[in-house]
Image: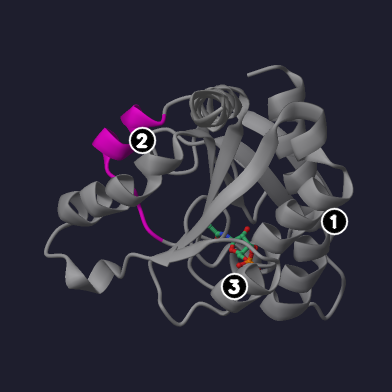
Amino acid sequence: MSQVGHKGPARSGARQTLNYRLMASLQKNIVILISGTGSNMVAIARAAQKQAWQQKWGVRVAAVISNNAAAGGLTLAKDLGLATEVVPHKSFESREAFDAALMARIEPHAPALVVLAGFMRILTPGFVQHYAGRLINIHPSLLPAFTGLNTHQRAIDAGCRVAGTTVHQVTSELDQGDILAQAVVPVLPGDSADTLAARVLTQEHIIYPQAVRDFFERGV
Ligand code: GAR
């Protein structure tokens, strides 16, 4: 009896371990990097929940990591039940050292996709190379126009009639990777950088979750 009793749980324990291993191999983890408000992160996490990405494709947001402990998005992520981590870039003497520490926090999640969502750090070529093909960003302009910062004011100053946003693969050249999705908004008379940014952001919340979903639907 005791032998049977002993073997039963041991076998089921081994089976459970196997199940975890299998789940881990089937699981497709997303790691989202943020620096601030985190509204795009929320849009992606909500889409994942509402559209049952986990059940359909084994896709889940495994962690939200910020370089800024004060990022409002960290609270929003916790409210959504997501694991959060902070790697404060100011604690590191070089970009390389920061990126190495960031990678050390990302790697345990074995991410199928790393999503930059308002992550305001330039990443080193080594980091970008490591995640090549599974590292995407959203940039608030119609790339290839207006790479870099202050995109909305620059679009207004240039007299653009339309502006927008771009989801793209990240390469070692700033805002230059393959375009995955874009959305266009009008630039209206009297727009400020803030009003234009708000209009662009509403479109980002639509195209970024869709682009992430497309990435996994392609079966990557
Ligand atoms: C978004 O508009 C995103 O396009 C932009 O920061 C904002 C982040 O908002 N990203 C960049 O400028 C990257 N160069 P969020 O924190 O609310 O998602």
Q: In the rendered structure, which segment of residues is drawn in magenta?
A: 121-131
Q: Position of residue 17 (x, y in %)?
A: 50, 29
Residue labelled 3 has its Cβ within 8 Å of some atom of ligand 1: yes
Which label lies toward us, 1 or 2?
Answer: 2
Q: Quadrant of ligand 1?
A: bottom right
Q: Earlier in the sequence, mark 1 or mark 2?
A: 2
Q: Earlier in the sequence, mark 3 or mark 1?
A: 3
Q: CA distance from mark 3 to mark 1?
A: 25 Å
The 10 Å Cα crowd at callout 1, few under 14, some 14 to 19, many 20 or more, is some
Horizontally, residue 159 falls left or right of residue 88, namely: right
To which residue does mark 1 refer?
185
Q: CA distance from mark 3 to mark 2?
A: 23 Å
Q: Tell me if residue 71 comes above or below residue 156 in the rendering.
A: below
State the quadrant of the C terminus: top right
Q: Position of residue 111 (x, y in %)?
A: 49, 36
Q: Position of residue 87 (x, y in %)?
A: 33, 65
